[in-house]
Amino acid sequence: EEVNGWGGYAGLRPGGLEDLKAGGVEGGGVLAAVWLQKSAASLTAMDVSLNRLGDGELAALAPAMGELRAMTRLDLRSNSLGAAAGGTLCSALEHLGDIRELLLGMNEFGDDGVAALAPALGKLRYMTRLDLSSNLLGAAAGSTLAKALENLEDMRELDLDINKLGDEGLAALTPSLARLRCLTRLGLSSNSLNSKAGTKLGETLQRMDEMRELRLGMNELGDEGFKALAPALEKLCYMTRLDLSSNSIHHEAGEALGKALARLGEMRELCLGVWEPPGATAWSEQLDAAYRSRNTAAQSQALSAALAGMSKLEVLHLSGNAISPKCMPDLATAVHSLPLTDVDLRSNELGVNAVDALSDLFASNHRIQRLRLGIVVCHEGRNDRNELGTLCLNRMAEPGVGPSGLTVLDLSFCHFGAVAGNLLALLLEKSQGLTDVNLRGISLTDEGVGELARALTQLEDVTALDMSGTRLKESGTTKVAEALARMDKMTSLDLSWNLMGTSGASALADALGNMPKMTSLNLSNNNLRAGGLAAVAGSLERMFKMTSLDLRRAKRVISLLSIPCFIGP
């Protein structure tokens, strides 16, 4: 039988497969079913992730899967498995006692599906990794999983990110978690956890001496929750990654935070910033709270002292923390000699008074690859922009100063003055390996656009570019389009809130024809009329991977497109 052009199974490996990877292959589940029976004694790992397998497809696959007695790794992530798949998978796993890694993230098992799956999970005594992230799990799943985990004492990685366990679900789960003395990675981010969860988790972590990675981002632990958690964190001396981002932790818990972090000398990645999730109501409220309760000198000193001891720190995210210019010198001094590769200081109200401190930070950290100094999102009524001014950009652009190997650069809404385009060009020329560039909201003059466009022609690896709200006119858009024509790796382009007009849109259309990998295009609020729209529509016919198109406030509706398209007023 021929599947995706692959036939003649016996000719590939007469003794059967040892490792089957069909993740992301259209029809990969069918392909797997064709070969499984001939690999029952040999197959140890199977990856059929990203295949849109539903409950019915898994039911067809399960009988053959149950015969794979040598299986140690099964990856079913990012399919469409629902509650019914739990029972189906349970039946197959009953015979696969040697499973070490079971990856089921990004499905829709829900509480009922996990309840059906749990009897088999409890028997996988050699399991070291379980991924149930993003599976619509609620409080009931916490109780179900608690019973299953009781016998899995070899568990090292447990991923429950992006569910809704809540305080009740976590309370049920923590007694079993405390038994997992070998656990090194625990993911509980975005689980609707409040201050009570901080207390429960603190008690549990006291027993987890081997913990290396703890993800608690996008919850609501708050100051009280973190204070309860902090004593346990102090004892996790092997911790290399800690994510507490978007948890409404303010200056009241600042000193406790500094004290806890001071003992984590092995830390490589520290995330205390604010994320930007879709539909960001709670996130916006957290930014408001950070804006109202600025970091105090005591908190700044405690945090800076802790950072100074993290000699291996590579990733530092502090966005949305209302770090005042007065606090920046302490912070810059603390990270002066750290091997940072990823720095996020967005939305911190850093002004020209912070330039010297930032310049010192950049001058001493030539390893920085990802630098974000812009804004998380533009919020009416609150100014948390980093208005760094011309002097800061000038120093960053100086030859031999600061990072020169950037791959990600975010300077959105940083006010650099009239010479922004010229200085940005110099900065971009230093980092020709850039893949993600965000210049949103930076006002560019006609001359500046020309210099910037010249620099963009050298950035052939860019996959995402945001130049929305940069005041591009027709001539400026034409210049930028000439540069974009060379960026055949581009997948996301945002030129919204400009004035590109008809001639600019026509020039852009020619460039879009050279971007076959484009998936997201935003040209909204550009006063596009019939001629410009027709040109853009013509180029879109060659963009087979396009999934999102935004043409809002265009003067004419395009009805011939078969992709999500935002149009009208």
Image (tube, rainbow, N blue to C red):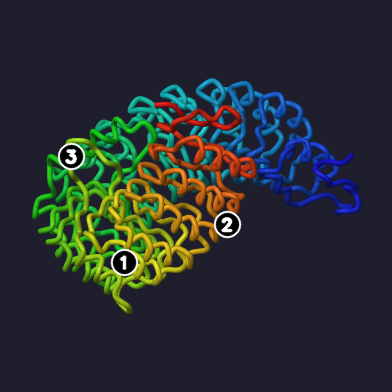
- Nearest-to-viewer mark from 3 and 2: 2
- How far separated are the C-alphas under marks 3 and 2? 38 Å
Q: From this view, report whether residue 86 is shown above or below residue 176.
A: above
Give residue 403's quadrant in the image: bottom left
In the picture provided, is 463 more to the left or to the right than 325?
right
Residue 382 got which mark?
3
Q: Is residue 400 left or right of residue 524?
A: left
Q: How busy is the neighbourhood of tag 2: few (under 14 within 10 Å), some, or many (20 plus)?
A: some
> Which residue is identified by label 1?
422
* Residue appearing at x 19%, y 62% in the figure: 331
Q: Amino acid at mark 1?
A: Asn
Residue sitting nearer the eye, 509 or 287: 509
Say which of 393 and 37 sits in front. 393
Front of the two marks 1 and 2? 1
Q: Is residue 91 left or right of residue 308?
A: right
Please give the name of the residue rendered at 61% of the width and 44% of the height, measured from the top-left corner. 543
Give the numbered dot on residue 289: none
Quarter occupied by the C terminus: top left
Q: Position of residue 181 (x, y in %)?
A: 43, 47
Residue at the far bottom in the pictured view: 400
Report x, y in % for residue 413. 27, 50
> Crowding near pointer 1: few (<14 within 10 Å), some, many (20+)?
many
Q: Callout 3 environment at 10 Å: few (<14), some (14 to 19), or many (20+)?
A: few
Residue 136 % position (x, y) = 48, 27
For badge 2, the amino acid type reads Asp
Which residue is depicted at the point 67% across and 39% down? 97
> Is residue 159 left or right of 338 when viewed as pictured?
right
